[in-house]
Amino acid sequence: MDLVARFRGEVALFEAAVRQAAAEPEAPPVPSCPGWTVSDLVLHLGEVHRVVEAVLRTRLTDPPQGTDPGFGLPAERQGWPEPGGGPTAGPVPAALVEWFADGARLLGDRFAKTDPATRVWTWAPEQSAGFWLRMQAIEAAVHRWDAELSVGEPGPMDRSLACDAVAQTFEVMAPGRRERLPASEGAGETYRLAATDGPESWTVRFSGADVEYPARGGKAGEAAAADVELRGSASDLMLYLWGRVPLDRLAVAGDRSVAERYFVLVPPV
């Protein structure tokens, strides 16, 4: 999978949905991001893009410092959201959309000319440009879905990206969220997610503070027995893990109470 192309494709779809929202007299609310309108969503993703681009451009190896670590916000921001605020009423400012588009283009170009192995700061144990490329392709897809939902019916996730996003959730997002947010200790709860549109499956176990992925059985190479199995398209599995679709969107086999405990173990963001 060409993650640079995937990133560029997702931000182009995001921009298209945002421009549709900007034609409305009021910024539409984003149902999947309570408390935000499309204006807030655009500012959020645009800020992330500018920060990541600055980290890659400067080869930053320590956390960004200061109040403006590369956001690139213009001085004149009439009608723009305040960083961290929301919901922001009024129409989506045209200048905000252009600022977003410029930042997304800059980051796409930066990804294209940066070796994924380049060491840079990230918020995770993996300290590489490749971490940011993978993370931002996934985040762009999730927020593209959010933006499309705000103006109509969102399209499904690219299947290859969705499969990678399920694995990335258990490799990166779940441990990070458990570390940063209040989360219950695991008691050995074991989940299997199985794609209905392909052969892929993923098994994860929560034990104490640990996220064991892939969870293994007693014999080498043997998958662990699962307390519950969640089945759905790769797109729906990804969207469920990101809190965008409900559990009822998936087929549940096994202990439903364990399924319903997932977001206690992995707090939503």
Image (spheres, rainbow, N blue to C red):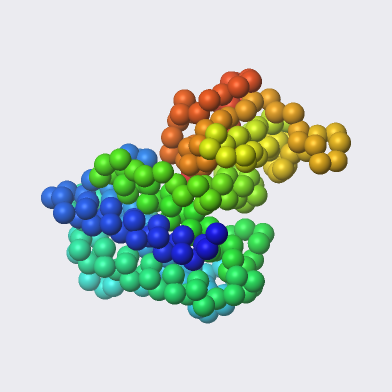
Residue most toward the right? 219
Residue 144: x %, y % from top left? 37, 51
In the rendered view, would you say 133 is above or below 31? below
In the image, residue 11 lies at what x, y percent?
38, 60
Instruction: Choose top left, top right, bottom left or bottom right for residue 189.
Output: top right
Closest to the observer, 178 or 158: 158
Residue visible at 56% across and 30% down in the picture? 231
- Residue 205 sits above or below residue 44 on the image: above
User: Relative to 254, is 49 on the left or the right?
Assistant: left
Answer above or below: position of 111 versus 139: below
Residue at image position (40%, 57%) is 10
Say above or below: 110 vs 175.
Answer: below
- 220 vs 255, left or right, is right
Q: Is residue 241 visible?
A: no
The image quarter containing residue 134 is: bottom right
The residue at the point 50 percent across, 73 percent down is 112
Q: Can residue 28 be spotted in the picture?
A: yes
Residue nearer the viewer, 160 or 41:
160
**x and y percent of residue 92 in the render?**
21, 56
Location of residue 260 in the rendering, given as x and y in whole percent from the top left corner: 55, 26
Left or right: residue 36 versus residue 167 is left
Q: Residue at x 65, y 33 (%)?
A: 192
Q: Name the quadrant of the N terminus.
A: bottom right
